[in-house]
Amino acid sequence: MTLTIKKFIEEFKVQFRSMYAYSYKEGSNEQIYNALGIYVKNYLSENWKNTRENYVENSVKQVYYFSMEFLPGRQLESNAYNLGLLDTIKEGLEEMGLSFHELEEAEADPALGNGGLGRLASCFMDSLASLGIPGNGNGIRYQYGLFKQKFVDGYQVELPENWLRYRNVWETRNDKSTCMVRFGGNVWLEKNHLGHMKTKYENTLNVLAVPYDTPMVGYRNDIVNNLRLWSAETPVEEEENYHTLEATEPIKEITQVLYPDDSNYEGRLLRLKQEYFMVSAGVQSILRHYKKYNLPRKNIPDKVAIHINDTHPALVIPEMMRILLDEEHLSWEQAFEITFKTCSYTNHTILREALEKWPVDMMKDLLPRIYMIIEEINKRFVETTLPIYGERITWQTAILQNGVVNMAHLAVIGSHSVNGVAKLHTEILMDDVLKDFFELYPERFNNKTNGITQRRWIQLSNPGLTDLLDEKIGQKWKRNPAELKVFKGFEQDEKTINELAKIKLENKVRLAEYIEEVQGIKVNPKAIFDVQIKRLHAYKRQHLNMLHILYRYLEIKENPSIDYTPRVFIFGAKAAPSYVYAKQIIKVINSLAELINNDTDIGDKLKIVFFENYGVSLAEKIIPAADVSEQISLASMEASGTSNMKLMANGALTLATLDGANIEIKDFVGEENMFVFGLSSNDVYELKAANNYNSKAIYESNDKLRRTLDALTNDTIPGLNGEGYAIFDSLVNYNDEYFVLKDFESYVDAQEKVDALYKDEKEWTRKSLLNIASSAPFSADYTIKRYSDDIWKVKQYVGQKNGVQLLDE
Ligand code: Z16
């Protein structure tokens, strides 16, 4: 049933006319894009239905990935590609005088996440479907995504991201599967006439949860899984109680906007409402669906796995208990066993300020029944732990501590599996952050290093590289990423090296054009494209990058003939709106860019491009053009990182501290094929333990560093309003929490090695080739296979054809 170009054109014209009642020739890009999206969605709807029905008919176990964030990116191209329609559609559009890539720009990029955690969730959705694993996403349909970032005089300004403005063609509102979520009020237990305990409620706020389902399309395997995002509405039967539109605000606001904090905990009541809303609706709908399997309740864990992505959805545990106790009337012991066997939890950060701790009073008021259950879980935990492990461990690990609910503790106690997201990160969880739990439950702990989908991050975003790989190593790598290592065989092949260098240059030319178009900066495509793309956070140390640029600038000014290889420093980063320090760093980088980019003494030697509004779509443009991947967090702080993996897979050389997954990158590609610098995680722990770090002494003793830091405060950089002072102060006078000054020298040395190597184009490209060929272990397909085998116990669904095979890992 292959689609011909002719048939596509005919059907598309009908589709457009039926939606807009005029010819596509008169349509706007948004309208044509919408018609195209609906066309593709119709095309996949049968597979979507069949997949759902087959799962139920065969009583397969399904996993539900609960996440407050998803960052799917644009879906037209990837859906068409996974369905095998992309070329037909492109050619058909061309015949109609339309350009696919222009239309694609009309698609909103749903920014329903902050950064790594949300993008990981979406890579996982892609891998689940492509492997044919029964896996669904569960999250929130935020009406406004993460803010749109603009720079005004170099300062970050946040604008609302109204991604639903021109409608969202991928979603299906599913009014048949709504749920009711209750907040607040009074709760008590009462014996009914049969002697059963019944839970009674009064004065609750009832919120209708409406699911919007989005197809998650597998790679050429006829599998379409589901992403279910919930939206809050006034219950129909209660509408008349709300006499004004205004009175419904407290309901609508629950799913209005995403909290813009990455690795940071925002203890607002509304956020807690969002978390419970998503969790309650998700668990209710799963348990309702389970009834279709006609099995006893004790078998739930054989058919259902629920994954808790960071602690944000950890209320799954008491919510599942509530339903099993209050609605299914199971005993506490039965309910807890089922819950525990069903749930698993991933930790994504060791940052103290990111660990969720909800005030008991807030929880009690908003979720009285849930709080009662948490108290009981805590009580029973303490009763069993105390006699065996004693006071210290018991109180350190309790859920209720000093008037707060410790969500990580709840997640660990209620889950059969706890994992970190890179080897080092999992070790740190076991030896430090969750050390006491590791003593209680060593068998629960395991590592699952993150991964990325090579379909979006190589095949779609880097067609040049994809064609080269196909030509050299055949097509098998697309279904079996391990095949990428065959590319290593070409490291000495001059022809391949030249072709690879040419592809990179073409990608850079394209990015250079885009930079000129959107940022108005002319850059030389032959310069080194040095990329740091990630959320702005002090621990990620964009300011270390900035200090090095400033240092270079001063060197060139002093000695114009100095032999630096021309370099374009590219940044993409949003700061949380309330994160003052992060915003100061943005301002300083932007002002420095203004200075350097307009200094005729500098010319091509140094350019800074700070893209506005970094997100998935921009990443797809930047990554294929990168030469250097900056992964410079203070060792031990970055749980994993995932831009490191995407950049490596596209042939960038990694410049990194031994942090997060950078360590595994080094293990696979070899230290000689990257640039490692700085303190190790152990060094950092020792330095902190010694408690004698003195950043001011470093400042005073290192001339180059002092000159660089002084340039932050002596009017070298025009346009600053104290931001340079703020950074100087934090580094010199407030003892430099993230050891920027300590790592500075070593970073500068590593940067000089980058320059030196780049002069040898052949050698550079050979290393680039080895990076691509060594990137296979970071395929999300493998990560998902490991979650499925070790944690979820879900199997690849057989009965579909093709798909991603994972022949030999
Ligand atoms: C997030 O993006 C991450 C951690 C976290 O606790 C909250 C959010 Cl929103 C990131 C980590 O910082 C990063 O190292 C990791 O690669 C990513 O999650 C995916 O695991």
Image (cartoon, rainbow, N blue to C red):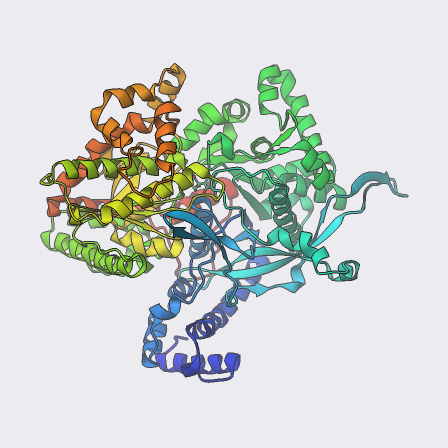
User: For this view, does 663 lie left or right of residue 438?
Assistant: left
User: For this view, does 187 lie left or right of residue 783?
Assistant: right
Residue lying furthest right: 193
Q: Tell me how many marks there are.
A: 0
User: For this view, does 323 lie left or right of residue 4?
Assistant: right
Question: Where does the N terminus fall, quadrant-wise?
Answer: bottom left
Q: Nearer the viewer, residue 469 or 290?
A: 469
- Above-or-below relation of 79 to 334: below
Can you see residue 718?
yes
User: For this view, does 81 lie left or right of residue 209?
Assistant: left
| Residue 472 image offset from top left, x and y in percent | 19, 57
Q: Nearer the viewer, residue 127 or 67?
A: 67
On the image, which quarter does residue 222 sit in? bottom left
Can you see residue 678?
no
Residue sitting at 59 percent across and 39 percent down? Answer: 314
On the image, which quarter does residue 211 sit in? bottom right
Q: Nearer the viewer, residue 745 or 284?
A: 745
| Residue 577 image offset from top left, x and y in percent | 48, 44
| Residue 406 image offset from top left, x and y in percent | 60, 31
| Residue 287 image offset from top left, x and y in percent | 66, 50
- Above-or-below relation of 418 to 238: above
Q: Nearer the viewer, residue 739 or 432?
A: 739
- Above-or-below relation of 262 to 707: below
Question: Where does the C terminus fall, quadrant-wise?
Answer: top left
On the image, which quarter does residue 55 sit in? bottom right
